[in-house]
Image (cartoon, helix red, strand yellow):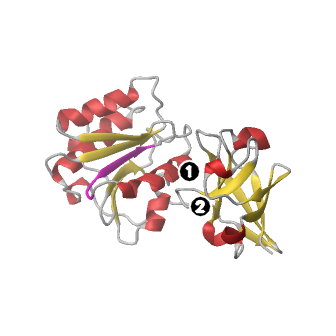
Amino acid sequence: MSNPTITLTTDYGTSDHLVGVVKGVILRIVPNANIVDINHHVVPFDVLDGALTIAAAYRYFPARTVHLVIVDPGVGTARRPILVTADQYYFVAPDNGVLSLIYERESDLSVRHITAEHYFLNPVSNTFHGRDIFAPVAAWLAKTSQTEAMGEEISDYVRFALPRPKAAGSTKKGVVLRVDAFGNLVTNFTAEDLPQGAGANGKINLQVGGKTVEKLAQTFAQGAAGEPVALVGSSGFVEIAVNKGQAARVLGVNRGAEVILETA
């Protein structure tokens, strides 16, 4: 591949040197790499937020893209660095569950424990594996596509299941998975969880933060000023939003809040 694409998803933020150094390591190995920043503001140490972020983005890149995902609260410990090969994409990440939604959505994949230390920078810091292990491995993978050289396949990789809504009588109980930059509440409900006919009549009954959301909109702009509405967002999850406002602030809730959907 003449100009390989490598994406970056991290919790590093952008106020320090970390992201720039990771890019520098990649470019020393693959000077013509296309490096795309997906998100450097994953909630710190939060593998679920990292899993949601990469799952929402990875399919929109060219085949053979290398997705580098560094949300690594266990850096320096015995947790393994891994390489995942899916149908069209590669993923380089710590083995801590941050790729759980990739495992769920991709049926044809292999997972390798990265043990080929000659690809690492030397010496390896105990606190910056993004620079010393993950970045060079991603770069060499983009350059050569030699997955087998990185290490042996494993089957005991770490994964977790996304919280699912639970039926309770005429309701389903869900949860706010994340709050995005616009203050929208991303729940774990999907379109399949909505009552039959909800899309046609524009009605819904969602209870969150002691308040009720009654309108199922098609766009953010359909809500009146200050009115929380529900809609199916671009990632497939039901979101609660306020037109030109922040649903999290209006409803006084944050991530982890219970959301109750009337289904009858």
**Residue 185 can be seen, yes or no:** no
Q: Which residue is mark 1?
A: 48
Q: Amino acid at mark 2?
A: Leu
**Rendered view: 236 above or below 20:** below
Q: Residue drawn at (57%, 56%), measured in percent from left and top?
A: 233
Quadrant placement of the C terminus: bottom right
Element at label 2: loop
What separation in Å lies between label 1 and label 2 (alpha carbons)? Answer: 8 Å
Q: Are marks 1 and 2 in contact (CB under 8 Å)?
A: yes
Element at label 1: helix
Q: Which residue is mark 2?
A: 162
Q: Nearer the viewer, residue 41 or 84?
A: 41
- Magenta residues (range): 63-70
Farthest right residue? 210
Left or right, 80 with reference to 146: right
Q: Residue drawn at (67%, 58%), measured in percent from left and top?
A: 217
- Which of the 4 image quarters holds residue 139? top left
